Amino acid sequence: MLAAAGVFVAASSAFGLAAESSDSLLVFTQPSNGSAIAGRFESKTRPALAELAESMGVALEVVDVSSAGAPADVALTPLIVFQNHRGRSVYQGRTDTLDRVRNLVRTARFRPQVAAVLERPGVPFERRGRMTLATPIKVTRLAGMPPKGFDADAFSEAAAGWVRDAAAARGAQTNAPARLGRSDRQFYLDFFPHRSADGVLSLGLAAYSQFHCHEPVFVQTDPPLSGAWDDREALFSEAFGVLMDAVDRVIAGSQLGDGFDPVPAETPAPTWAALGLALPPAPPDAAPPPVAIDRWPTDWVMVDPGPGEPPAVQFAFAAPQDAYRGEATRVWGTLTLGSPGGGGIIAGATGRFAADPASVTMGEADLDSEIHASMLDVAAHPESFFVLEKTEAQRVSPEFGVLTPAVLHGTFTMKGHAVPLTVTASMEPVTAASGELRLVLDARWSLGLLQPFGIDGPSGDSGGGDTLEFAARLLFAPAQSPSGS
């Protein structure tokens, strides 16, 4: 029946699943449209998803939207959806990041997503077929030499307005809030203005996927866009065009899993049931669903990564010295979430995260000994730590199946020297393999080592080679059981 409707079903028996299993990964595709994204998904990602589904005891069902149509809330392809008798959850992440797909399956098996629309006032957006593409804008404060009588806040506000005007000129909507469903997408556009003493305005540019707020999918900084200060409105308009052209290239040909094909607006929209994809009945031996969380735990404690998961903290020197890399193997910490009435559960987060410098390893015993003794002086300074003092976030509270971007502000201390540190991060609640509630904090930051820590980079290179880039994936468990969990 499904095959006749244009649906290919990987039968449960092919994966050795029990016949009563109600877990399915649904994948909506448009293989016949000939796009690079569709071709890459078919050749690379779909086979990997089949292996993942088999390993987790989940049936894989693939829907060809071009011939079968798709439910109205399927706005782009490839789109991955998990469903069982408890509900349906749309995967929001890079299609190539299978660890996050695994997290979705683990979590949604017990706690499916709730229907939700993210409303973002002041964000330009446009319709592409069924889907909405939103482009949040950030203009940093002017660097360099401002003109006499300069008002930094007024400039940033005016510049954002010029960008919104440029978006409107290209057909985007700017007056109504962007309303984003699970299969809509965002790309963040950042503008970095600098004015020289002779009145030249330069704009560095970066675009970020909504699924990775640490590493941009596009950067233009060398050379930046530049022009006369008096032509700043036209320069910001040009910069928006450059960024949108870059976003279009990512959408059409991303090698990281950020690309997609919008579902055409005229595509038939059968119901899930009409496609044979209604939620199945509960198996006779199905475990009762967990009680809904009506109050998120306030206090969390860091736990060790599970088998096969990345180390909590990894680091590497900046390119071209990035062959020098390693990890810290002893890491601990606590996280305290805020209250809904105190500015937000996530935005109110504080914490303290620490590592033992003696656990730093680059994989060579002799090199590690030198690092511990001469570089980190672990005998005198047995702990390096970051105190989280303030958090910025777009969402009030954690949400299953959703990455919440955040910016963490605090103080980092190493070798007795304390420096202010800003960290780009994302937060997501997940269900561990054991079925227990966990919170993942994924963070990225860079740190110069020569000043004030007195540490040279590889081969004594202090000319930019002393920058260390960190990646952390910190896993937290509730310090005590939450009410209603």
Image: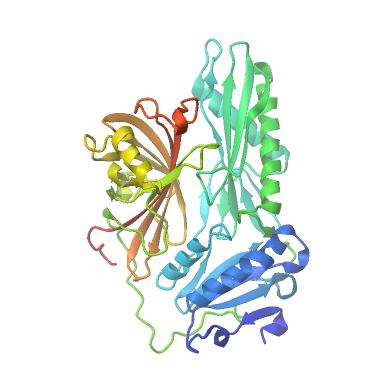
Q: Relative to residue 10, is residue 140 depicted above or below?
A: above
Q: Quadrant of residue 196?
A: top right
Colour scheme in use: rainbow
Q: Position of residue 326 (x, y in %)?
A: 41, 46
Res. 463 visible in picture = yes
* Front position in the image: 411 or 305: 305
Residue 274 higher or lower than 326, as above or below: below
Q: Residue at x 67, y 23 (%)?
A: 226
What residue is at 27 percent from the left and 34 percent from the top?
Answer: 377
The residue positioned 58% from the left and 77% from the top of the image is 60
The quadrant where residue 469 appears: top left
Residue 161, placed above or below residue 2:
above
Q: Would residue 353 be visible to someone looking at this image?
A: no
Identified at 77% across, 68% down, the residue is 32
Left or right relative to 224: residue 214: left
Which of 171/420 is in front?
420
Nearer to me, 114 or 387: 387
Q: Position of residue 461 (x, y in %)?
A: 47, 28
**Percent position of residue 454, x then y:** 35, 26
In the rendered image, the quadrant that contains the C terminus is bottom left
Residue closer to the observer: 96 or 429: 96
User: How many marks overall?
Assistant: 0
User: Which corner quadrant holds the N terminus?
Assistant: bottom right
Q: Position of residue 283 (x, y in %)?
A: 43, 87
